[in-house]
Structures are given as structure tokens and as C-alpha cells.
Image (tube, rainbow, N blue to C red):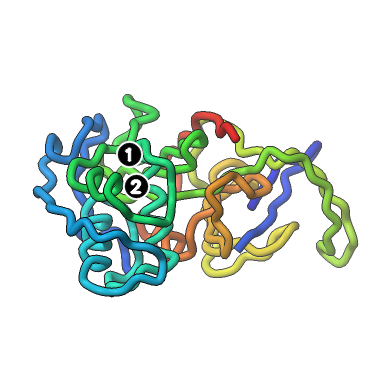
């Protein structure tokens, strides 16, 4: 993850099947339910699912999430971490308390889902929006929702850490904050990128040293030094969907 520090910007770390295909055409001026946006009707199997579950009902869940723009990873009928992160994102967008369990309320929402809240109604047709309040990132491409992902942003907890950087032992301090504002994507790296405070996977920078990047830990609460952590399978596909000089809008505030 990246963090802003007094006098400098430092970086830190944490840390498929592509969502580019088969996602819906939710308009940027999103309306309340998928039925209103033309998404095909869906009847939930209603079976309670938890991580580790296997079978046809899991595959139905995965296909529905992908249809709505969430990336559940490989559609294989296995409820693993990738599917869980997509469930979290869906639940948060639909006003449900995020939980790894898919039960009646989540199935009901999957039958009549909400589109994600538009943070910048007059934004460019292709842009990324980060909602810090819900810890969700939405990527719009040509005015359509292309990808919705669970994220973990800056924890807001001040830190000081010692790291070996450029052959020297240095101490870095910051407030672990992901600033709100309007930015644009800049440089990026493929694979693991070593930063001041660790490793970032497939980072795409948009505000100095602050980037979208894959992480091995993407909890439900903000936990990074400032970057926007993504599930690893989302970080695999995002570079092909999010180009350079694309607007990135960060809004909201997470309340613990």
C-alpha cells in the first residue's frame, strides 16, 4: 500500500477469470434495480452457502455475481476466497452487512439487485470510483459498469516503520490515509513491485505513491498504509481494463 508522509510519499505493501467478459451494461447514471437496467431475471436456489461449499448452487451464485459485474474468480462451483470477496462487494452495494454466508437476504438481493451508487454523476464515461464509506471500487468503461470490487483502503492509523531501502535503514512515518479527491492513473508495474514498506502486486498508481494493487490480505475494514488493496484475482484482470490517464475519483469516509 502507499502512504503519504511528511515531505515525501512512501509505498507499502500487503499482498482468473476475467470480469471483462460477460459483465452487464449497467449505465453510469445507475438506477435502483437490475430489472430496470435490463439484466435477465434470476431465480435464486435459496440454499445457504458458506466458504468451503461446493456444488451447483455455488456455480449459480458465481454466474450471477459475474453477470452483475462482480468477479467471483473461476466459475467452478467452489466457494473460495475470490467468490467470498465478490459476495462482500455485492452485499455492501446492496446495503447488507457483509458476511461470508449467502442466505435468504443475499439471495433476495441477487434476484433484485441494486446498481452501485454513482459518486460522480457527470464523470467521464471511463473512470474508476472508490467509495471509502463502503470500501468498494467501481470501474466504468464507456459509461457502463465493467467491474465492481471489494477493496481495503488506508487504515487512518498513524504509523512509523523501519525498512531497509536503497541500501540504508530508514524510518518512514505517515497517517495511513487514502485521500479523497480527483486523480488520474499514471505509471504501473507488472507482477510484484517492491516498495518502501513491502510488496505490491500489479500496482496501478493514481495519486503519487498511492495505487490500486493486489494484496494477500484484503479485510473488510481499511487496513493499508494508504493504497487501495484489491483481491489478488481482481488485480490480475484490472490492468487490462484500466488504462493510463483514466480519472480516479475517491469519495466518502469509513466509519468504524
**Residue 171: image x %, image y %?**
87, 52
Tell me where residue 180 appears, x and y as whole percent.
56, 31
Q: Nearer the viewer, residue 200 or 67?
A: 67
Q: Quadrant of residue 176?
A: top right
Secondary-structure class at tag 2? helix
The residue at the point 88 percent across, 56 percent down is 170
Q: Residue at x 34, y 47 (%)?
A: 90
Please give left or right for residue 181 compared with residue 60 in the image.
Answer: right
Quarter occupied by the C terminus: top right
Q: How many marks?
A: 2
User: Residue 132 versus residue 41: which sits nearer the camera?
Assistant: 41
Answer whether residue 193 is visible to the viewer in this image.
Answer: yes
Tell me the quarter of the picture where residue 143 sits. Answer: top left
Residue 245 tag number? none
**What residue is shown with label 1?**
94
Closer to the camera in the image, 120 or 92: 92
Local crowd size for mark 2, using a 10 Å CA cut-off: few (<14), some (14–19), many (≥20):
many
Q: Residue at 17% across / 54% down in the picture?
A: 44
Mark carried by residue 90: 2
Callout 1 secondary element:
loop
- Residue 102 placed where, x, y %? 33, 55
Q: Cα distance, mark 1 to mark 2? A: 6 Å
Q: Residues within 10 Å of mark 1 (few under 14, many from 20)?
A: many
**Is disc 1 in contact with disc 2, using a CB cutoff of under 8 Å?**
yes
Which of the 4 image quadrants contains residue 37? top left
Relative to residue 78, is residue 25 drawn left or right? left
Q: Is residue 218 above or below residue 94?
A: below
Amino acid at each position: 500500500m502507499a502512504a503519504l508522509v511528511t515531505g515525501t510519499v512512501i509505498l507499502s505493501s500487503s499482498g482468473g477469470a476475467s470480469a471483462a467478459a460477460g459483465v452487464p451494461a449497467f449505465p453510469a447514471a445507475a438506477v435502483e434495480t437490475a430489472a430496470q437496467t435490463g439484466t435477465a431475471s434470476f431465480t435464486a436456489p435459496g440454499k445457504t452457502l458458506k466458504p468451503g461449499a461446493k456444488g451447483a448452487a455455488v456455480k449459480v451464485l458465481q454466474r450471477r455475481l459475474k453477470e452483475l459485474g462482480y468477479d467471483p474468480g473461476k466459475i467452478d462451483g467452489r466457494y473460495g476466497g475470490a467468490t467470498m470477496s465478490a459476495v462482500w462487494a455485492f452485499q455492501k452495494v446492496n446495503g447488507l452487512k457483509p458476511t461470508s454466508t449467502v442466505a435468504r437476504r443475499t439471495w433476495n438481493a441477487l434476484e433484485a439487485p441494486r446498481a452501485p451508487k454513482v459518486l460522480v454523476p457527470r464523470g467521464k464515461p471511463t473512470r474508476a470510483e472508490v467509495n471509502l464509506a463502503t470500501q468498494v471500487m467501481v470501474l466504468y468503461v464507456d459509461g457502463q459498469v465493467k467491474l465492481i470490487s471489494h477493496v481495503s483502503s488506508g487504515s487512518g492509523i498513524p504509523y512509523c516503520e523501519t525498512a531497509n531501502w536503497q541500501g540504508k535503514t530508514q524510518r518512514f512515518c505517515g497517517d495511513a490515509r487514502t485521500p479523497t479527491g480527483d486523480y488520474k492513473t499514471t505509471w504501473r508495474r507488472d507482477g510484484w513491485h517492491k516498495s518502501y514498506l513491502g510488496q505490491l502486486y500489479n500496482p496501478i498508481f493514481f495519486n503519487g505513491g498511492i495505487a490500486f494493487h493486489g494484496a494477500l490480505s484484503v479485510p473488510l475494514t481499511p487496513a493499508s498504509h494508504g493504497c487501495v488493496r484489491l483481491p489478488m484475482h481482481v488485480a490480475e484482470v484490472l490492468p487490462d481494463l484500466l488504462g493510463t490517464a483514466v480519472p480516479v475519483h475517491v469519495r466518502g469516509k469509513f466509519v468504524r
